[in-house]
């Protein structure tokens, strides 16, 4: 006579599997009992109060303010480069002619502005006094129309 192929470990795994299945069915039944079938639309609607919080009570129609739709402006901000008209003075603080960029330190505010070789009108070197204009670039203000002061 041969031994049974069912070991203790196999029996335990089968018991766990059956217990999981029963627990799952039990949870399913609980969900069915607690389900709110047939809830009306008014029960499902949420309102936002004047402070931005969700509430189930509708707002007071007397407190409603009338807004003229023609006064609302919707537009896309202009992208790219906005040229600032004033000409500024400064000194070339750093310039790498191999890579074609540098920085100008403004005389009045001591702020540094990036410039590219494409924004140069005259050839410049470090410590040259220059005049330039500013325009908005992708990462901040850039110096353009850089000319060497004579």
Image (tube, rainbow, N blue to C red):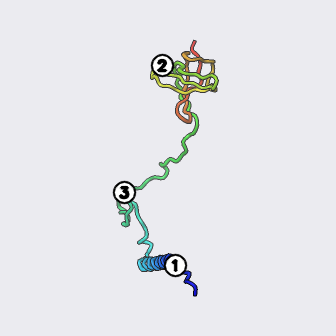
Point out the tag, 3 or 1, that comes first from the N-terminus.
Answer: 1
> Disc 3 vs disc 1: Cβ atoms closer than 8 Å?
no
Q: Nearer the viewer, residue 10 or 111?
A: 10
x, y percent for residue 66: 41, 55
Task: Give the left or right position of residue 55, taking residue 25 as reference.
Answer: left
Point out the tag, 2 or 3, that comes first from the N-terminus.
Answer: 3
Check disc 1 and report the residue beneath it.
7
Mark 1 residue element? loop
Mark 3, Cα crowd under 10 Å, few <14 / some 14-19 / many 20+, is few
Q: Nearer the viewer, residue 88 or 85?
A: 88
**Where the N terminus falls, by quadrant?**
bottom right
**Vertical comparison of 71 with 127: above or below:** below
Kindly give the residue lying farthest to the top in the view shown: 150
Q: Is residue 7 visible?
A: yes
Between disc 2 and disc 3, the foreground one is 2
x, y percent for residue 95: 58, 22
Between disc 1 and disc 2, the foreground one is 1
Q: Nearer the viewer, residue 5 or 40?
A: 5
Check disc 3 and report the residue beneath it.
50
Quarter location, residue 58: bottom left
**Where the C terminus falls, by quadrant?**
top right
Check disc 2 and report the residue beneath it.
107
Q: Is residue 38 visible?
A: no
Q: Nearer the viewer, residue 108 or 86?
A: 108
Mark 1, Cα crowd under 10 Å, few <14 / some 14-19 / many 20+, is few
x, y percent for residue 147: 59, 19
Q: Residue at x 46, y 78 (%)?
A: 19
Q: CA distance from mark 2 to mark 3?
A: 51 Å
**Vertical comparison of 69 with 24: above or below:** above
Task: Give the left or right position of residue 64, taking residue 103 as reference.
Answer: left
Q: CA distance from mark 1 to mark 2?
A: 89 Å
């Amino acid at each position: 006579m041969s031994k049974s192929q069912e070991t203790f470990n196999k029996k335990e795994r089968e018991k766990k599997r059956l217990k999981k299945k029963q627990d799952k069915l039990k949870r399913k039944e609980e969900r069915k009992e607690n389900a709110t079938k047939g809830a009306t639309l008014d029960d499902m609607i949420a309102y936002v109060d004047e402070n931005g919080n969700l509430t189930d009570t509708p707002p007071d129609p007397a407190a409603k303010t009338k807004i003229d739709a023609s006064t609302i402006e919707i537009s896309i901000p202009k992208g790219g480069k906005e040229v600032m008209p004033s000409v500024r003075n400064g000194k070339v603080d750093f310039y790498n002619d191999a890579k074609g960029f540098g920085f100008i330190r403004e005389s009045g505010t001591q702020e540094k502005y990036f410039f590219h070789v494409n924004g140069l009108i005259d050839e410049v070197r470090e410590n040259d006094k220059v005049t330039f204009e500013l325009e908005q670039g992708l990462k901040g203000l850039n110096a353009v129309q850089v000319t060497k002061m004579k």
